[in-house]
Image (cartoon, helix red, strand yellow):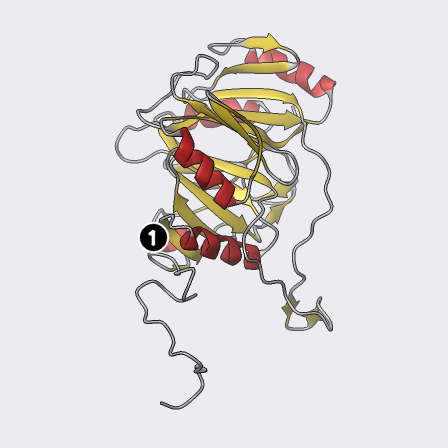
Amino acid sequence: MSGIEGIDRIAYGVDDLAACRRFFLDWGLRLVDERADGLDFESLNGCEIAIRKADDPSLPPAVEAGPTLRQVVWGVGIETDLAALRAALSGQPGFAESNGVLSCIDPNGIGIAFRVSRKRPIEVAGTPTNSWGRAMRIDQPAAIYERAEPVEVGHVVFFTETLAETTRFYEQLGFRLSDRYPGRGHFLRCSTRGGHHDLFLLQPPGAKRGLNHVAFTVRDIHEVIGGGLQMSRCGWETQLGPGRHPISSALFWYFKNPAGALVEYYADEDVLTENWQPRDFEPGPTMFAEWAIAGGIDGNTRRQKSAAAPEPAKFITEKR
């Protein structure tokens, strides 16, 4: 089974709509609709981010207390892809079909749905890089971003108590295992060829279900930094970053999110094909981050928050 192209829409259930409005505008999303009961944002390519009050009856049930992600809608290419998914989904709890959308609850208790993708093609590109022996940027300076404009929601990460069962469910839908922490976590991509993972299922030592983070793809590593600095200037709290994941190779920056758990800017992840063989890793801090800055970077001084600001009109190379 195939045809799943990526995340098309996510829906949060929250307590504080005003805080979420400020946060996601600062994050770089476009506000497309605002009502007393909710907000609708979109990324550059039209991926939808819905913010609803936690008691909104249109949302699937929450698997944890407090604000959290309530539904992930996956996009497929064409109508026949939905027909192929229908049989696999129809036996799941909460299965429903309405207006071309198939929805149910996955084995982890998370609301999921599938529809023909509504994202639009866009022409954006990251800054070419100059590695040794392969100069891709000639007579052209690299970009500096004053803020981020996320391209799309790239992946979601959930805690689970049912790692094996939930993984089997997604594999039956066409997801492929990319890498794993044996017995602890599975990185899954929704198609044979694509980014390193669209879904990461993490089973902690204590029984737990819920959201770990939602990750937004940006154009390049410079936009990760520019977006993170903007969020810092706006007063939002860094959880960790910037840093680099050794498993997916991506550069990241995580922030605490009033809509629930964390959100991540990331760029430069590995791209995999049918030739990729899943690897096994032992969980640990160095497997999560090859390197990372605790507390983030101050958006005004452009230095690590624990570091002193540079002296005015001084270059770092000047002798003191």
Q: Is residue 119 above or below residue 138?
A: above
The residue lying toward the viewer, choosing from 105 and 241, is 241
Quadrant where the C terminus is found in the figure: bottom left
**The residue positioned farthest toward the left in the image shown:** 206
Residue 92 image offset from top left, x and y in percent: 49, 12
Residue 66 image offset from top left, x and y in percent: 32, 27
The quadrant holding residue 159 is: top left
Image point (38%, 79%), residue name: 311
For mark 1, give the secondary structure.
Answer: helix
Quadrant where the N terminus is found in the figure: top right
Residue 54 image offset from top left, x and y in percent: 38, 21
Q: Label 1 crowding class (10 Å Cα cut-off): few <14, some 14-19, many 20+?
A: few
Residue 233 image offset from top left, x and y in percent: 42, 55
Image point (62%, 15%), residue name: 101
Residue 137 located left or right of residue 216: right
> Hey, what amino acid is under mark 1?
Pro
Task: Give the labeled residue for mark 1.
Answer: 285
The quadrant holding residue 62 is: top left
The residue lying toward the viewer, choosing from 241 and 110, is 241
Q: Is residue 19 above or below residue 60?
A: below
Image point (33%, 56%), residue name: 295
